[in-house]
Amino acid sequence: MEVFSMSSRKRETYQVEVKHSLLWEAALGIAAITNERLLETLDYTKKQWQTIKKSLSTEMLDHLEMVQEKNTWKTILLLLHEKDMGSVEEFNDFVDHLDEEELRYIAIPYLGKKHQEDRRLASQGDQEAVARLQDVSKDNAFFPRYIAYISQVDAHHLKSHIQEVMTGWYEAVIQTDEAMFKGILEQDAFSKKKRIEKLEAEDFVEWATHGIRYMPEPSVYKVIMIPQFIYRPWNVEADIEGAKIFYYPVANESIQPNDPYVPDQMLVQKFKALGDENRLRMLKILMGGGRTLKEMTEEIGMGKTTVYHHLKLLKSARLIVAYGPRYHVSPRAWEMLPKELELFLGEEK
């Protein structure tokens, strides 16, 4: 049935805010170095991570082991979203003045409005509330264990741990290259703020994150975009009450600010992926519908390993997506590509 609309009201969406801080960069560095499964996929080389580890004290390495075991990097990130803080000293002072229940409440992840009472009860040590939160978050890789830990850990011990690991990392990693980190983050935040006015909120998030299409959700009024260098090329996603957070990878132009013509890394990757006859043939086939690796191999008449390699490159460029065993063209990628190219070529340098 057709609907005749007399409304002139546009579909509501969220507001986008870009923020940056060396403290978030420090917290994400702590998260990165303790995520061994992901470490080799990051832009930082194995040699760089080894150099960082060698610069850390034995006590600091012990703290990082605890971070890896208990995921206390999450506590640090959640604390940093409570107020704007400009220094480690300010962060440590803020932590000092939290009472035990406040600390636990902040550290327990936000799981939605209807679970806020259980979050409060869990922060008071109510194990039935903890069990309910664990059940709600059972699909998350670490939330159930993390929530149980936060609800029972000695608050003074937790405070001391997060203060020492933040101070130790900041002094050993951030402070030694503070001007570089600060320049990169400031440049990227400035560049992104200029683009906010040129793109719709959802298009902006998709462009900045290189492919995450985040649609409006009930009770999410704001998306906070935080540039980060140390976790490149990955996005890190989080939730706080009323807001979605994306710690997104800084663009190439922010790392090389003295080159006014450097293109964005993902833009280059997309056109490199398109610059191959076989990959273009595959895209043409996928335009007609999804295919499995086996179907694509039979249809295009190439070896399975070669086809998989081409599909992997197309997928890493966000031009195709995989749903289960089937590959599909990403329609949003094609909608965004002309906009991305126009933004780069048309921007005044």
Image (tube, rainbow, N blue to C red):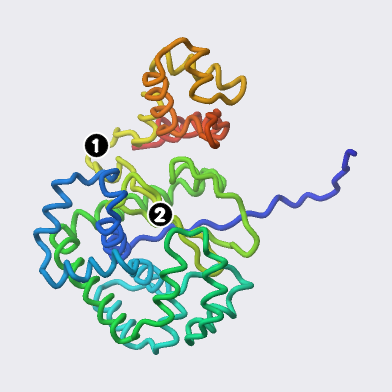
Of pointers 2 and 1, the one earlier in the residue sequence: 2
Residue at 53%, 29% in the rendered image = 327
Foreground pick, 324 / 252: 324
Residue 65 appears left or right of 239? left
Image quarter for residue 254? top left
- Looking at the rendered structure, the kind of residue marked 1 is Asp
Question: Which residue is the site of mark 2?
Answer: 236
Seen at 22% across and 41% down, the residue is 258
Q: Is residue 53 above or below residue 201?
A: below
Q: Write the residue at 34% across / 85% down.
A: 155
Please tell me whether mark 1 sits on a helix, a strand or a loop. Answer: loop
Q: Decide which of 62, 81 is in the foreground and name it.
A: 62
Residue 285 picture quarter: top right
How many numbered discs?
Answer: 2
Numbered disc 2: secondary structure: strand
Amino acid type, callout 2: Val
Q: Position of residue 220 (x, y in %)?
A: 59, 62
Q: Quickly name the residue at label 1.
A: 259
> Residue 59, image x and y in percent?
14, 73
